[in-house]
Image (spheres, rainbow, N blue to C red):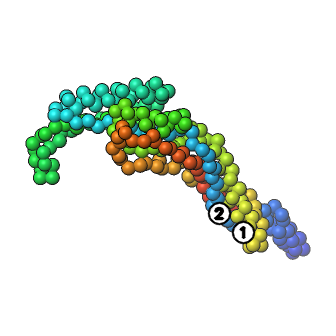
Amino acid sequence: MNRRLLAPLGLIALAGLASPAAAENDDERAPDRLMWLSGHGEVRAKPDLARVTIGVVTEGATARDALAANTQAMQKVMAFLRSAGIAERDMQTSNFSVSPRYRDEMQGSQEVVGYTVSNTLDTTVHELAKLGAILDEVVSQGSNQIYGIGFDLAERDPLADEARKRALADAHRKAELYAQAAGVKLGRLMALSETGGAPPPVPMMGRAMMKAEAAPVPVAAGEQTVAIDVSVAWQID
C-alpha cells in the first residue's frame, strides 16, 4: 500500500467523526435530559343542578298494610315532583325494601310485630331556585326521609378544558423559573399526562327523618370546582 495515502485517509475519517451530522446523530442517541414538573388548574362556577334522594318509610302490622301506606305516599310525592317540572328521566327508584320488625331485636327475638317498607327516589332538580320549595313540599306530600343534597354542573367539559389550559400554563411557568435558576435552556415538550377532572364527591347530609311541620328549607348552592392536574416533561439543554 502507498504510505503517502494513509495520512489523507486518516484526516478524512477524523473529519467525518467531527462532522455536524455525526454530532447530531450522537446527540439523538444520547438519553434526553428531562425536567419533570406538575401543574394545577381549576375553574370555579355556580352549580346549575342538584341531586337529592327522597325517601318514604312506612310501618304496618302486616307487610300489605305497610306497603299500601308507602305506595300511597310515594305516589303523592312523585305526582308533586312531576307538577313541579321534574322530568321522568330525572326520577329513578334507587332502593325498595320490605322487612319485618321484631319485638326485641337486641335479644335475637324471632317474634314479628310488624313490617317496614322503604322506598327511595333519586331526583335531579335543574331549577335550583325551586329546590328549597320542592324539599319542603315533598315532606308535606309524604316523604319522611331526605338522604342528602349534592350540587353539580350540567356541562363540565368547557370548564375542564379551561382548567387544562391553566394547568399546563402553571407547569410551564414553573419550568421556565427552574430553567432560569439552573442556568439551562428549556427545550421542547417531551411528555404530558393528565390526572383529575372527575366530579368532586357529592356532599351528603346524614340520613334524617323529616317532619311536615318543619320550616321551609334554606338552600345554599355555593360553587363547584373543576380541577385538572398535569405532569409534564421538557427537554433541557
Which residue type does callout 2 highlight? Leu
184 relative to 202 in the view: left or right:
right
**What's the residue type where badge 1 is placed?**
Tyr
First of labels 2, 1 by sequence position = 2
Q: CA distance from mark 2 to mark 1?
A: 10 Å
**Residue drawn at (38%, 36%) of the image:** 139
Circle 2 packing at 10 Å, graded few (<14), some (14-19), many (20+), is some
Look at the picture and state if 17 lies above or below 85.
below
Q: Compare residues 89 and 100 and report the one nearer the observer.
A: 100
Which residue does the image show at 69% across and 50% down from the upper left?
165
Q: Is residue 125 above or below residue 209?
A: above
Q: Are marks 2 and 1 in contact (CB under 8 Å)?
A: yes
Circle number at residue 204: none
Residue 13 picture quarter:
bottom right
Residue plotted at (60% across, 44% down): 46
Q: Which residue in the structure is indicated by mark 1?
A: 178
Q: Position of residue 38 (x, y in %)?
A: 63, 61
Q: How many marks?
A: 2
Q: Give the SS element for disc 1.
A: helix
As displayed, is residue 196 above or below residue 113? below
Q: Which mark is residue 37?
A: 2
In the rendered image, which quarter contains the C terminus?
Answer: bottom right
Q: In the rendered view of the protein, which quadrant contains the N terminus?
A: bottom right
